[in-house]
Image (spheres, rainbow, N blue to C red):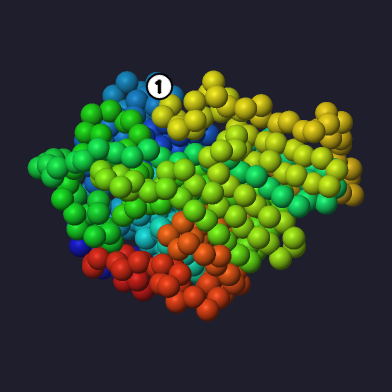
Amino acid sequence: MIGFPSIVPASVLGKNAPSNKINIGQIGCGRIARSHDLVDTMAFDTANVMAVCDLDSNRMKDGKLLVDQFYQEKKGKTNYKGTKMYEDYREMLLDKDIDAVLISTPDHWHAQPAMEAAMAGKDIYLQKPTSLTVEEGRQLVNAVQKNNVILQVGTQQRAMPQFRIAAELVRNGRIGKLHTVKIGLPGDPEGPEAPAMPIPENLNFDAWLGSTPEVPYTEIGVHPQKGYGRPGWLRHENYGAGMITGWGQHHYDSAAWGMNTELMGPSSVQAMADFPKSGLWNVHGDFMVKHEYDNGITVLTSGGYPNGVRYEGSEGWIFVSRGAYVASSSDPVAQEKSKKALDASDPKILASEIGPNETHLYKIDDQHGNWLDCIQSRKAPISPVDIGHKACVVCLISHIAMKIPRKLEWDANKEKFIDDDEANALLSRNQRKPYGTNYLKA
C-alpha cells in the first residue's frame, strides 16, 4: 500500500450537492462486488460509479472494465474509459469528487476502510459482517456517528418483502407470545492441506493480510487467480469466523427485526461446534448455538434446521427464508434446496392485514437503492451501523462460545461477558502494524 497521512474530511475538500448524482468509489472488486454490489448500485440513475480499487491489479482492471462497459452501453459511448483505478483505497478517499464508497472486501478489511471513509466524510455501503471483532465494531459505530455519515450494512434480507411481513406479523402478535426462534445456518467443510506458493505479481499480499498475522501465501487461502468463485479466505479464521458471520448476520438481523431486539442483545450464549482437525481451512463445521434473552425468548441456531428463520409463539409459527433468491451464483445454499419463502402453521396468519394503528416496519424495495435515497435525504437507512453492529455481535459472541464449552453470561449494554476474562479476551484481536483500527485517530 502507498503511505498516506491522516484522511482529510470531505467538509474540507468539498462534497457534491445532494441534488446531483452520487459519485461512488468501489473498494474491492471481487465476487460480491461484481455479482451484487456494483451491478445493483449502477442500476440506479442517481449513482455514478467513477472509481475502483483492489489490491489485486487484475481484479482492479476487471472492475474498471465492468464499470466502463456498463456506462458504454448506458451512455452509448463505445470508447468510454472514464473509471479511475486506485491501488490504495486511502488515495481514493482523498478524491474530493467521490461522495460515497461501496466496501466489498474480505471480512477482515471491513471495519478499517469504513472507519477511514467515515473520517473522510464519505457515505458508506458496507458488506456484512460489520466487523471482525466486537471491539472494532464498536469503534466503527463511534466513527460513523461522530462524523454523521450514512452507512448502510449489506443485510439485504430487509429489502425482501417476506422478511418484513414475517417480522410485522410476529411483532403484532399474530402467533401469540413469541417464545422460541430457530435459525437454520450451515457450516463449512474441511479443506485440503495447502503448501506455500509464490505470491502472484498482481497481488499486494502484505496489504491483503492487513492487520491479520503474516502467513505464507496460498491461493485457496485468498481468492482464485482465475475466475470469481467462492474465495478460500471465507473458511479461515484469520479473516472471518465462517458461516456464523457469513450468513449469520443476515439471519440474526432478520430475527431481531421480528423479536424487537435490534438494539439489544442476548443475556447468555452457549454453543458447541466441530472444527477441522487438519487442512488450511479452520472455521466451524456443524454446530449448535443457544441464546437467551431477558424478555424470555430463546434463539436456537444450527445447520440441522432449514435455512431461514422460524418464529414460534403460543398460537402458531411463521417460517421465512430467501426462497429462490441468491446474491451470487456461489451462495452455499442451492436454489433447488431452498424452502418456501414464507410459511405459517395456519394460512390465515399470512393473510392477516396489519392495521393502521399497529406496528409497521421500514419498507424498501432495494438495499442499494435505499442507501442512495438516504444519501440524498440524510435520513437513516434501513440497516444503519448501530443495528448492523448489534447483529454482528450476536455472530461474534456465538463464535467465541464455540471455543469455550460453558454457558457465557453477556452484558449487551457494556458489550462484555460477565466475570469471564477468558471470553472477554476474545472480544478483540492483536492487530499487525501498521494496519488495524487501533491505529486510526478517529
Residue under the point 31% across and 68% down: 430
> Which residue sits furthest bottom?
419
Residue under the point 48% across and 62% down: 405
Q: Is residue 366 visible?
A: no
Q: Position of residue 262 (x, y in %)?
A: 65, 57
279 with respect to 308 (left or right): left
Residue under the point 65% across and 41% down: 309
Residue indicated by mark 1: 73
Q: Position of residue 293 (x, y in %)?
A: 68, 62
111 w.r.t. 236: above or below:
below
303 w.r.t. 394: above or below:
above
- Given the image, on which type of amino acid does mark 1 rest? Glu
Q: Is residue 406 visible?
A: yes
181 with respect to 146 (left or right): right
Q: Position of residue 420 (x, y in %)?
A: 49, 75
415 with respect to 30 (left or right): right
Quadrant location, the C terminus: bottom left
Using the rendered view, name the quadrant where residue 82 is placed.
top left
Q: For this rendering, which residue is in front, 74 or 205?
A: 205
210 with respect to 437 (left or right): left
Quadrant location, the N terminus: bottom left
Label 1: few (<14), some or many (≥20) within 10 Å? few
244 w.r.t. 62: above or below:
below
Residue under the point 60% across and 34% down: 306
